[in-house]
Image (spheres, rainbow, N blue to C red):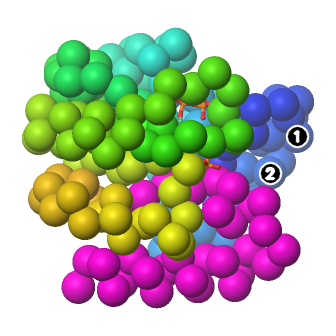
Amino acid sequence: MNREKDAKTRDFLEVAKSCIKICRAHGVPLLINDRIDIALACNADGVHVGQSDIPAHEVRRLLGPNKIIGVSCKTTEQAEQAWIDGADYIGCGGVYPTNTKANNLTVGIDGLKRVCLASKLPVVAIGGINHTNAAAVMGIGIPNLKGVAVVSALFDRQCVLEEASKLHATLVEATT
Ligand SMILES: Cc1ncc(COP(=O)(O)OP(=O)(O)O)c(N)n1
Ligand SMILES: Cc1ncsc1CCOP(=O)(O)O
C-alpha cells in the first residue's frame, strides 16, 4: 500500500512508480491509498478508500472489474455498503489506539469481530497493531479476518527489516 498524505501529486506519482517496479519484481500487488489518478497513472493493482473519500462504487466504475478495491469500515452498515459497492476487501480499525491517524475512532477487538461477522468480504485489521498484539488480533478466529495492516510498527522503528521479520514470525505462528 502506498499511503502518502502530504506529498505533491507529481512526487507521489514518482514514488508510486518506484514502488510498482519493486512490487512487480517480487510478485506483490501494489494498492494506492485514496488516489485513483495516481493508481491509473502508474497502473497500480488497486486503490484503498476511506468513508470520506470517493465512494467505492465510483472507484469500481473508474477502475473497471479487474482492479482491487479496499474500503475502510468501522461498522456493519459500512461493511454492507462496501459489499454492495463492489469492494474486494475491508480494512477495519483502528483496532487499538494509534498516533498515525488523527481523530480516529478506536473500534477495538469487538468492533473488528462485528465487522468480520457482518461481511462475506475478506477483512484486514488496522490501527495500533504490532508484533506484541498481532497474535491476539488474528486469534479472534473468524475465517474472513485475513491479515493485519501496519504503519508505525515498521516505520516508527530503527530497522524496518528487523520489525517486519518479527511481525512476520508472529503472524506465521498465529495463523498456522
Ligand atoms: C487495509 C487498510 N485499512 C485502512 C486504511 C486507511 O484508509 P483510510 O480510511 O482512507 O484512511 P487514510 O489512510 O486515508 O487516512 C488503509 N489505508 N488500509
Ligand atoms: C490508516 C489508518 N486507518 C485506521 S488506523 C490507521 C493508522 C494505522 O497506523 P498504525 O499501524 O501506525 O497504528
In this view, 36 is above or below 174: above
Tell me if 128 is positioned left or right of 59 in this view.
right
The one nearer the camera, 36 or 74, is: 74
* SS for callout 2: helix
Give the percent coordinates (x, y) of residue 130: 55, 64
Left or right: 47 with respect to 14?
Answer: left
Nearest to the observer: residue 121 or residue 13: 121
Residue ID for mark 1: 11
145 or 96: nearer the eye? 96
Residue 145, horizontal then vertical, whole percent: 24, 55
Q: Is residue 149 visible?
A: yes
Image mark for residue 156: none
Residue drawn at point x = 84 percent, y = 31 percent: 6
Q: On the image, which quarter does residue 99 sit in? A: top right
- Would you name the residue on which mark 2 appears? 15
x, y percentage for residue 131? 53, 72
Q: Amino acid at mark 2?
A: Val
* Drawn side of residue 152 relative to residue 11, left or right: left
Dot 1 alpha-carbon crowd within 10 angstroms: few under 14, some 14 to 19, many 20 or more:
few
Tag count in the figure? 2
Residues drawn in magenta: 147-176
In reply to whether residue 170 is colored magenta, the answer given is yes
Q: Is residue 111 left or right of residue 168?
A: left
Q: Quadrant of residue 121?
A: top left
The type of residue carrying mark 1 is Asp
What residue lies at 32% left-to-right and 45% top-to-bottom?
109
